[in-house]
Amino acid sequence: MKVSALSSLIIFGFPAITFATESDSPEKAFVGYKSAILSQDGKAAVSYVTEETLKEYQNYIDWALRADRVELETLSFFNRFQVILIKHRVPSSKLKTMNGRELFSYAVDQDWIGKSGVIPLNVANFEIADNRAVSDAFSSGQKLPLKLQYRIENGAWKFDLVQMMKIAGRSGAKSGHSQPSAERNRTACL
């Protein structure tokens, strides 16, 4: 499914560091994010994503370090898969010292990104309302059936990956992996 593949690619491509001002646009946030992914600049990438995105990475750490089998089975297929990848790729001793922001940055630095999916990705048709915005996403010139989301945080536009994580989680459920109602409810609250 094109959307779920794109979701995975975007989620594991992480943003770039420059400090934006209120005059910056959501489009600049996306361009900075994409640039950071392509240059494997985790420190920069963190500056282009929302705090809610970084909280999700903190959840991955918490699940990887503390969740028992019962709790892991309540997660969506996508979240379980992320936890497995993190446990496999990040030494436990290092993971114990990290927070969500550091894990996100580390993942970008380690090139855990689908660059081939990010390279053809472009955005257009921004709709801005107060401190939120959405845009259409295009891959190789073809419009995708989703809207990317942005938010102003601390005076700067940020790219919100949480929506993409939700889509990836739902696509796992569509591919035959169950998503318990507790997880659907948790996801809906993000």
Image (cartoon, rainbow, N blue to C red):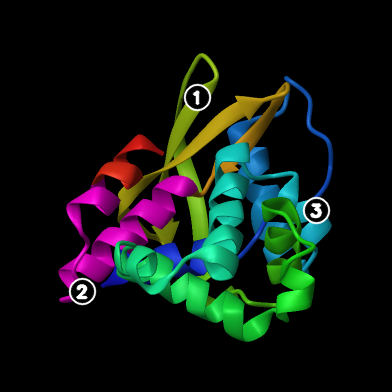
Looking at the image, residue 140 sits to the left or right of residue 157; the answer is left
Q: Is residue 104 magenta?
A: no
Label 2: state its secondary structure. Answer: loop
The span shown in magenta is 162-184
Q: Amino acid at mark 2?
A: His
The overriding secondary structure of the stretch rendered in magenta is helix
Quarter holding the N terminus is bottom left
Q: Is residue 167 magenta?
A: yes
Quarter holding the C terminus is top left
Residue at 62% x, 48% y: name it. Answer: 54
Looking at the image, residue 151 sits to the left or right of residue 134; the answer is right
Residue located beneath label 1 in the image: 132
Q: CA distance from mark 1 to mark 2?
A: 32 Å
Residue located beneath label 3 in the image: 44
Q: CA distance from mark 1 to mark 3?
A: 22 Å
Q: Residues within 10 Å of mark 1 (few under 14, many from 20)?
A: some
